[in-house]
Amino acid sequence: MEELPVPHNIKISNITCDSFKISWEMDSKSKDRITHYFIDLNKKENKNSNKFKHKDVPTKLVAKAVPLPMTVRGHWFLSPRTEYTVAVQTASKQVDGDYVVSEWSEIIEFCTADYSKVHLTQLLEKAEVISGRMLKFSVFYRNQHKEYFDYIREHHGNAMQPSVKDNSGSHGSPISGKLEGIFFSCSTEFNTGKPPQDSPYGRYRFEIAAEKLFNPNTNLYFGDFYCMYTAYHYVILVIAPVGSPGDEFCKLRLPQLNSKDNKFLTCAEEDGVLVYHHAQDVILEVIYTDPVDLSLGTVAEITGHQLMSLSTANAKKDPSCKTCNISVGR
C-alpha cells in the first residue's frame, strides 16, 4: 500500500484571538484514501513537550477530511496574543478502527490576534454590571516620584509625554504594549468627594481640572476590565483628542463610549457648566493619549502613604474570575 501524502506548504489565515484557518498542499497520489487529518498544536514555549515517538500515536485533534482551508475554532482553548506551533499529518481510518498515517509535516509558527471590538464589548457589558452609582468629581490626577516631575521639567520642556502602555490587564487587550498615553486617576473618597491622600505610584501628585482633558473635543473609549486576584476591579478608559493619532488608533480597535451617558465616566453640561461623574464601584485607570503640560495644573506632595501593594504595573489578570473574564482566551 502506498504511503499517504505528507502535507506541505502549510498556510495559516483568518487569525482571530480564538480561531484560525489552516490549509496545505498534498501530492495527488493516494489522496483519495485520506479520511482524516491529525493536527498537533502547541504553545510555542512548550513545543518540545509533545513529541511523538511513533507516527501513529493519536494527536491532539482528529478531524474529518474536509475541503481546505479548514477552520479551527473551539477544538482548543486558544489564548489571544499567544505564539503557537502547528504540524499536520494525513490519516486513513481502517475497518478495524485504527489509522494509517503519513509522516508529520513541517512545523509552522503563528500568533493569535488581540481581542476584537466584539470581545471588548463583552468585557464592557460585564464591567457595566458592577460599576455602581456615579459620583461627582472635578480633577484628574497623576502620582509620581519627585524625580519624574524634575525630569519632565528639565528634559521635556515641562510637558509629560505619552509612553507605551505596559502589559497589565487582559492578555488579549489591543492597547497593551501598543497604545501610547499618560495614566491618570479620577477616583474620589466617598466622604470628602476629593482624591484620596494615599497612592501606590509616588508621593507627588499632578492635579488638573477635568475639563482640560475631557471635553466635547475628545472621544472616550473602553479599553479593558480586569482584577488582580482581589475583590475590587479595574476599568481602563482612553480619552483621545478628536482626530489625534491616539483617536485614530482607538477608533479601529476599541468600543467608543458616549461621553455624556455611560456607566463609567461622564462629561455633561448642566446650566452651561461641564459636570463630571465617575463610577463608584470600579477603580478607573484613564489613559490620555496626548502630551500634557505641567503648567495646566499643579504639582504637590500628598500627605498620605505610598501603598505599593495597590500598584497595577504589569499586573497579571486573574484568569479564574467569573466577573471579569469572557469565554475566549484570557
Image (spheres, rainbow, N blue to C red):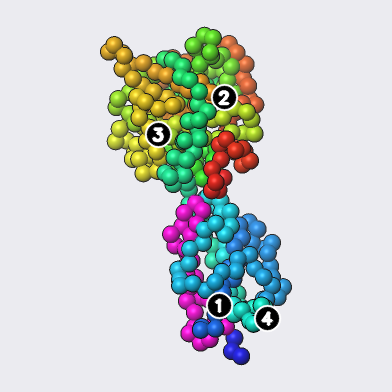
Q: Which residue is mark 3?
A: 221
Task: Residue lying at the far bottom in this picture: please name it.
Answer: 1
4 or 3: tag closer to the N-terminus: 4
Q: Which residue is mark 2?
A: 201
2 or 4: tag closer to the N-terminus: 4
Q: Point out residue 78 in the picture as x, y percentages from the top left corner.
A: 56, 54
Q: Which residue is mark 1?
A: 35
Residue 122 visible in the picture: yes
Q: Is residue 16 above or below residue 152?
A: below
Please say if the residues under marks 2 and 1 sit with CB atoms less than 8 Å apart.
no
Q: Which residue is mark 4?
A: 96
3 or 2: tag closer to the N-terminus: 2
Q: Point out residue 33 in the picture as x, y percentages from the top left corner.
A: 54, 83
Sort mark 4 into few (<14), some (14-19) or many (20+) by Cα contacts within 10 Å: few
Q: Amino acid at mark 3?
A: Tyr
Q: Amino acid at mark 2?
A: Tyr
Discs 2/1, front: 1
Discs 3/1, front: 1
At x 44%, y 15%, the residue is 136
Which quadrant would residue 84 be assigned to in this image?
A: bottom right
